[in-house]
Amino acid sequence: MIWLVLALFVASPAFAQQAPAPAAQEEFVPQVGQAGKDVVWVPTPPELVEAMLDLAKVTAQDYVMDLGSGDGRNVIAAAKRGAASMGVEYNPNMVQLSKKNAAAAGVAGKATFVEGDMYKADISKASVMALFLLPSNMLELREKFLNLRPGSRIVSNTFGIEGWSADETVTIENNCSAWCTALLWIVPARVAGTWRTAEGNLVLEQQYQMLSGTLNGKPIQSGKLRGDQIRFLVGTAEYTGKVAGARIDGALRSGGPAENWTATKTN
């Protein structure tokens, strides 16, 4: 009888030992300055995020990417403008936080986040890169940026790209104490080489968006690319045009009505 009572005592739910409740998982909260794989996390102020996107003229037709996207603020802000956008972030906790922030902002359908290495990310679809990276990171990514489609825009918080001067710079003047400057680069077409024109050979040397060279032996001045748009002077004549692969079509102005001009690349 005593064994039966003991068995009932042990089996009874009222007396059975309760298993300890699982500890509640702490919510991830990023800390300014926390170490990452390639950079520490420092958030871009919201005012500068908007200034960067304004400078890049982001619209709903753009595909915006951020490498090392942190809590997702650049991507989410672009998505609020209607742009499809993606963040690549190595820290899985940051990725989950970004998805949560995108859902809270109502843009989960436009803003996506993936866990990955920013140096290995495929950025070929991007028309805009919105970034806050160190100069060393920007330098390592420079060639990938230059391989984007001509006219693609790269906009950065504060830090530049070694050797490649920004096309535009904007600084927030009011109520900004740190991280107040946005820089813009527009990916230039590749035009270095020899081109055949009606006036003779156009020989171009290219340093990112800056151009030098000769037209029929005469030096060109003020040569510059803005994406696929080219401009240079030969004496008082102004040449402008659009680069499309191995062809340039444009206008020549030299005191009178504009004339058409074309160039075809020979090497």
Image (tube, rainbow, N blue to C red):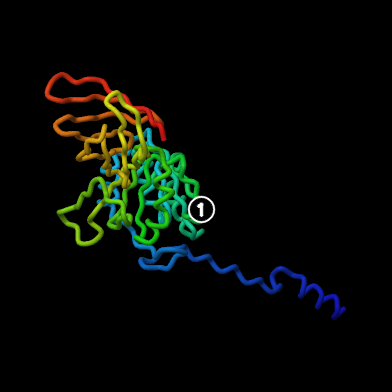
Residue 249 placement: quadrant = top left
Q: Residue at x 35, y 48 (%)?
A: 130
Q: Nearer the viewer, residue 83 or 132?
A: 132
Q: Residue at x 47, y 64 (%)?
A: 37
At which x and y percent is residue 53? Answer: 30, 44
> Is residue 112 something that shows in the picture?
yes
**Which image quarter is the C terminus in?**
top left
Taking 140 as reference, is 52 left or right? Answer: left
Residue located farthest toward the left when viewing the structure as drawn: 255
**Which image quarter is the N terminus in?**
bottom right
Q: Amino acid at mark 1?
A: Lys
> Is residue 104 something that shows in the picture?
no
Q: Residue at x 28, y 47 (%)?
A: 184
At which x and y percent is residue 151? Answer: 34, 37
Q: Residues within 10 Å of mark 1 (few under 14, many from 20)?
A: few
Residue 137 placement: quadrant = bottom left
Residue located farthest toward the bottom when viewing the structure as drawn: 2
Q: Is residue 169 above or below residue 216?
A: below
Task: State the SS at label 1.
Answer: loop
Q: Is residue 2 above or below residue 54?
A: below
Q: Which residue is mark 1?
A: 120
Q: Nearer the viewer, residue 177 or 63?
A: 63
